[in-house]
Image: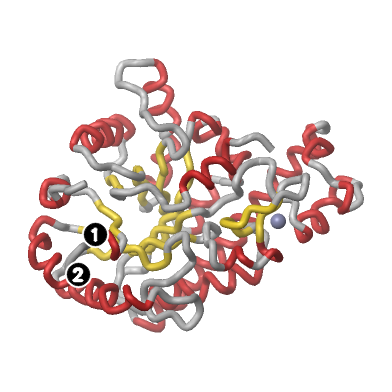
Amino acid sequence: MKLNYREFFMQKMVILLKPEDVEMSAKDFLSTYASYMESVGIVGKGPTGYANYPSRTAPIHKENVQFFEEWVELTHALGINGVIGMDLYTDAWFAKDPKYQCMTSSGQTMEHQICPNSHDFWEYSSEIIKELGSYPIDEILLFGTGFIRDYFCFCERCRKEFAPLVDQEPSRLTYQYIIENPEYHDKWHKWRSDKVHEGLVMLQAAAREIDEQTEREDPLRLSVEVLLDPETGLSEGAKNEYGYDYAKLGEITGNVLINLFPWSPLLPQKGTSDYTELVESLYFTNEFTRRGGRASLFRWGVTTMDQVQELKQLARDAGIERIVTTFNYPADYSRRREAAIGNY
Ligand SMILES: [Zn+2]
């Protein structure tokens, strides 16, 4: 599809592009469109797990390196707010190692998503934050920051750590066993949420470390993606499903990126009760703004002006200032959707 980029950039939203989206050099693209941009995003590490910059930590998409570096340098020189996309637990390269894959209670492994209970992976990701933060950028959007669903994770490490908390043998721990006892289920939610936020604390510390090393004037922002979908009970349901704690998120990074309806194709129409419910479900974001942080509305695959206007309307109604979009859905979208809303 041929998109009229100018029309999109004029909407004052942040568009997160992949180097592959831009069919010309960074210099040519930016000299054509920079005057319409206040802020623009480029993917630093996407769900393939490969970095678009010369990482010393992650494997590299060599063909994107020159583009990426030129892009970052130029946006900075032109005074455009620079945003970088980074997939966290959605990392297919790292997830090749079975030791880190998410697993269902019946032993089915997810070869595209890392179990958030992985100290080694937090360290790995902290290095990537520092590498990205050594470029003159303003913000990193962290994608894939929670568990796949409430029925994850039953990898060996999670079993071993969680089973003793509910008087069970690691090998005999099942999702059924946990949900049959409300007290166990509460413990499960709390334990998983603690893991998610422990990881984020480490990433935020890495961001502060690179701030000092680079003597940044404004601290590097980490905006954390949270999924908000009717399939998983909007913002309330998402806490237990994915392991989010909005108050902690506010304290740790202060910035949240709400991925609207990742598993459902259509947003509700204004005027319907579903729409009102969605707006109410976004009220928690006021707390981020009140504390000096930021909440943004995010959507994958926004390619028409109608979609843009729909998002802007919702943002206005929910008191959210910024919209972030991509032109495409992630390449592994169908697999992710299946893992999140399929039957396990
Ligand atoms: Zn696990």
- Residue extending farthest to the front is 1
Tell me if residue 223 comes above or below residue 59 in the rendering.
above
Along the line of sight, the residue nearer the viewer: 319 or 14: 14
332 in relation to 302, above or below: below
Out of 287 and 243, give the one closest to the viewer: 243
Helix, strand or loop for disc 2: helix
Q: State the image coordinates of residue 219 (x, y, percent, origin top left).
A: 36, 68
Residue 58: horizontal and vertical position, in percent?
49, 75
- Image check: 252 left or right of 107? left
Q: Regarding mark 1 in the picture, which secondary structure is present there? A: strand
The reply to whether callout 2 and callout 1 are in contact (CB within 8 Å) is yes
Q: Which residue is mark 2?
A: 75
Residue 191 visible in rendering: no
Where is mark 1, residue-wise? 40
Q: Is residue 289 above or below residue 57?
A: above
Q: Quarter for ligand 1?
A: bottom right
Q: Mark 1, residues whose alpha carbon is within 10 Å: few (<14), some, or many (≥20)?
A: many
Residue depicted at 61% across the width and 49% down the height:
147
How far across and down, in percent of the image, does residue 300 sit? 36, 45
The residue depicted at 53 percent of the width and 46 percent of the height is 336
Q: CA distance from mark 2 to mark 1?
A: 8 Å
Q: Residue at x 49, y 66 (%)?
A: 49
Q: Position of residue 180 (x, y in %)?
A: 82, 31
- Amino acid tagged 1: Val
Q: Is residue 118 left or right of residue 284?
A: right
Inspect the image, locate mark 2, and give the three-letter code of the amino acid beneath it.
Thr
Label 2 Cα crowd, 10 Å radius (few <14 / some 14-19 / many 20+) = many
Q: Is residue 196 visible?
A: yes
- Answer left or right for 193 relative to 85: right
